[in-house]
Amino acid sequence: MNLKFRHAELHLGHRETIGLRDATGTLVQCLRGVLWITQNGDRKDYFLGAGETLKLDRAGLALIHAAEAADFALFAPPPPLLVRTRLYRLVLATLRAIGGWFAQNFGPQAIAARRLRGWYGAL
């Protein structure tokens, strides 16, 4: 089963385990109790107490085991920025820069400054 979520709060009883597959980037926050977390391909094991967090950084299976009854929260990683969104932001920044240049060179203050220079230049 593949669940989609942004934030989930879960409870594990004493010695219960939950497995997360391909959860790279997911943040695990222990709210109460003690969690033991191990990730596929990682030689380290992590123990989290209340208030502690861990960001899962390995592909594959991650096991979260309750050393004692525990409540914890899972926070999904932010979605990757799409190429289209990046392109829109680039175009918007370019248009703002061009607009600023036009305002500086052809806006009301620039026209007034040219008129003043023209009047004083004729003297």
Image (cartoon, rainbow, N blue to C red):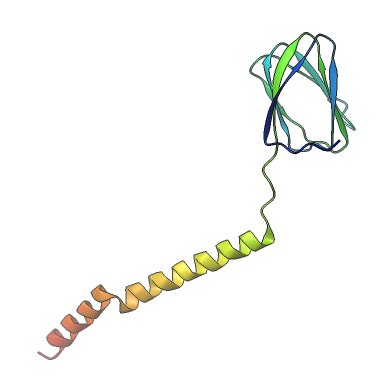
Identify the image quadrant of the C terminus.
bottom left
Location of residue 10 by image quarter: top right
Residue closer to the observer: 85 or 119? 85
Give the percent coordinates (x, y) of residue 25.
Answer: 74, 38
Name, please, the residue furthest toward the left.
123
The answer to whether 52 is drawn above or below residue 8 in the figure is above
Above-or-below relation of 77 to 81: above
Is 95 left, or right, of 66 in this rendering?
left
Query: Residue 102 at what x, y percent from top left?
Result: 37, 76
Q: Quadrant of the N terminus?
A: top right
Q: Is residue 5 above or below residue 65?
A: below
Q: Position of residue 62 (x, y in %)?
A: 85, 29
Q: Is residue 25 left or right of residue 92?
A: right
Left or right position of 27 against 44: left
Depth check, front residue: 31 or 45: 31
Residue at point 20% right, 78% down?
A: 112
Q: Residue at x 39, y 69 (%)?
A: 100
Residue at the image point whose x is 44% and y is 73% from the top: 98
